[in-house]
Amino acid sequence: MEFTTLPHTDIKVSKICLGTMTWGNQNTEAEAYEQMNYALDKGVNFFDTAELYSIPASADRHSNTEKIIGNWFQKNSNRDKVVLASKIAGKADMSKFIRTTGFSKEALIDAVNGSLERLQTDYIDLYQLHWPERKTNFFGQRGYVYDSSDFWEDNIHQVLETLSDLVQEGKIRQVGLSNETPWGTMRFLEESKVHIKLPRMITVQNSYNLINRDYETGMAEISHREKIGLLAYSPLGFGVLSGKYLGNRLPDNSRLKLFPNYKRYAGTKAVEATEKYYKLAQEHDLSLTQMALAFVNTRPFLTSNIIGATTMKQLEENIGSIEVVLSDEVLAGIAAIHSEIPNPAP
């Protein structure tokens, strides 16, 4: 396993992070235990979860994943072996059943305390804002659309003040963003620069993969100059970049079969690009899965690559990608395809 550090800290994390959002829905608790045991044995010490999980979110399944992880900690007495990240849900229809959502002081305190109880731990290493409260472009919306009805009141100072209190109490160690834009990222960073006692956002968890490299426009420079690391989610584009959907296939128990609304990475141009990447991988005796993940692993702005799996075979291949070295020829082939079909998935 390769390791990095969470920016501005001495917290050492594996470059592969174990994603958990299927546990409690597509995966049973026993299967989740098997995944965690295997990942830890392979050197993966970084797990990412959220109060919203499992996905798709629902009133009867939200927070199941945190409960499963907490039970595993309790059973194995190994909380100290894991760098644990979780998230508070923002305002949205899919999260309204959790509680009064958003990032008010009361909501943040309630969310952290709830996560700590479910996770059966005294602290969370990295606590993230799952998505912005304000109306902006995220979750598959490529461009920002001006909305005159958006009366969001800038509360970033208050959010950081509350997070600071939670840090002082020892309930969280570090803070980060998720599904955030360049404007939002810089707004948080500037607030903590001006008010130096406020905590600094150290990571941003955004989607990044071969068919969605939007992070490179704006966010990559912020990562470089501000030293805020990317935690890349959907590195396989909901499994599209495994190649399992090519040829109009729709395997049983696959995400797109179970949840047909998850079409972010399944558009015509995205499929065309995926076919080209698949052919490139075949030409170099690589699986498309490992080529796609290995590419993400090479990015200079990456702190950790969040992989997820519903089967042990998938998990083994995903974690094994850390050992794959892409040749200059493969990287040139990826660059050529990206130039021809740039960012086909929003």
Image (cartoon, rainbow, N blue to C red):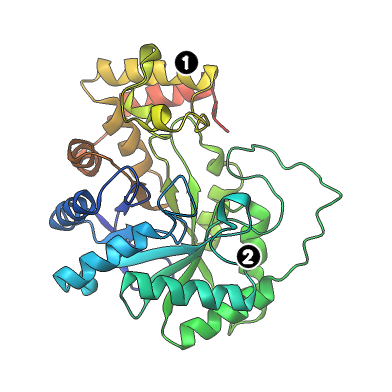
Q: Which residue is mark 1?
A: 272
Residue 216 lies left or right of residue 276; in this view the side is right
Residue visible at 50% across and 82% down in the picture? 166
Q: Which mark is residue 311?
A: none
Percent x, y of residue 143 = 69, 38
Q: Earlier in the sequence, mark 1 or mark 2?
A: 2
- What amino acid type should be assigned to the residue bearing mark 1? Glu
Q: Which mark is residue 102?
A: 2
Q: CA distance from mark 1 to mark 2?
A: 38 Å
Please, is residue 151 above or below residue 80 in the view? above
Percent x, y of residue 248 = 40, 13
Q: Nearer the viewer, residue 1 or 236?
A: 236
Tell me the SS state at disc 2: loop
Q: Is residue 295 visible?
A: yes
- What amino acid type should be assigned to the residue bearing mark 2? Gly
Percent x, y of residue 302 = 41, 51
Residue visible at 35% across and 63% down in the picture? 66
Q: In the picture, which quadrant includes the C terminus?
A: top right
Counting other residues with Cα less than 10 Å from the Cα at mark 1, is it few (<14), some (14-19), or many (20 or more)? some
* Circles 1, 2 touching at the beta carbon (< 8 Å): no
Q: Is residue 9 visible?
A: no
Please, is residue 303 above or below residue 316 in the view? below
Tell me the SS state at disc 1: helix
Please, is residue 76 above or below residue 198 in the view? above
